[in-house]
Amino acid sequence: PYVSYAESFEPATAPGYGVILQPTTGQQYEAGVKFQPANVPLLLAAAVFDLTEQNRIIGIPDFPYIAQLGEVNIRGFELEGKSNIGQWDFAAAYTYLSSEITKSGEFDAPVGNEIDIPRHSASLWANYRFPAWTIAHGFNLGGGVRYTSSFWGETFNYIRNPSATLFDLAVGYDLGVVGAALKGARLDLNVTNLTDEEDLACYGENNCVYGKARTVLGTLRYQW
């Protein structure tokens, strides 16, 4: 178990807008626990937190100007688990975030509204390592899913972005299986957003941003 308190300070700039911004500051309380049972390949973690942030930088929808909120409160909890069962590796995580504008700041942002972060996000990953007695020894095959719930695109809460579910894939090969000379070398192929889902988030009627399309990354690495 653990508890922590942290304060943050970050200078803020708005290049090109001619606006003088106040530094962004924050205070966070957190408590959590990590648990690993004896003789069991399992790790569990849970945490709750409460963050208060002043002068958070935001964009005003459909207007070329940067502003700051007076104060925002974000609270929530995180759950995480990892395990190894035989040739399988598993990882799962879930985060819940509740946000609220508590002080409007320099413009009339509605107190009580949420900010532009999803309330729910979750991920699940599984990886299989082929054993030595199979013809595929040295290979590993993994797959996972990532989910984010719908969320407001701006502080006035009139643009709602849809939820998104994305799938990932990974294939790897330990080149050390070929021979001792290649020990420590491996080849990996990772595909994010496997089905090439359109992940679009809007922060104003004329301010929308696409998430990453399907991305394929090959990596050759060597460790010694």
Image: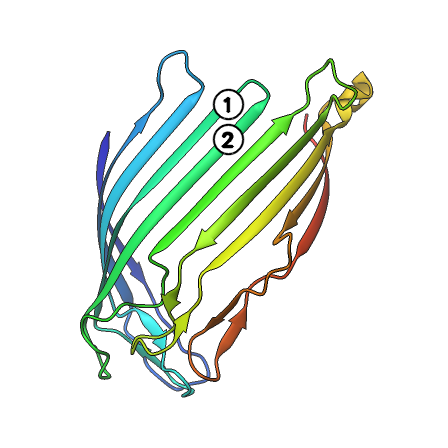
Instruction: Identify the secondary structure beneath mark 2.
Output: strand
Q: Which mark is residue 189?
A: none
Q: Is residue 40 left or right of residue 4?
A: right
Closer to the camera, 82 or 187?
82
Quadrant the N terminus occupies: top left
When the figure is inspected, residue 41 is found, relative to residue 70, above or below; the finding is above
Cα distance between the residues tagged 1 and 2? 6 Å
Q: Nearer the viewer, residue 135 or 2?
A: 135
Q: Which mark is residue 84?
A: 1
Vertical comparison of 184 with 61: above or below = above
Residue, disc 2? 90
Which amino acid type corresponds to the residue marked 1 in the rendered image? Asn
Dot 2 crowding, Cα within 10 Å, few <14, some 14–19, many 20+: some
- Measured as percent of width and height from the top left, residue 183 is found at 74, 22
Q: Earlier in the sequence, mark 1 or mark 2?
A: 1
Q: Based on the displayed image, in which of its 4 quarters is residue 132 positioned?
A: top right
The residue that appears at 19% across and 70% down in the rendered structure is 112
* Residue type at tag 2: Phe
User: What's the residue at 62%, 28% (across, down)?
Assistant: 128
Question: Quick check: 190 above or below 130?
Answer: below
**Residue contact at pointers 1 and 2, CB within 8 angstroms:** yes
Residue 141 versus residue 86 in the image, above or below:
below
User: How many labels sit on residues?
Assistant: 2
Residue 223: percent from left, percent from top: 68, 29
Q: Position of residue 190 (x, y in %)?
A: 67, 44
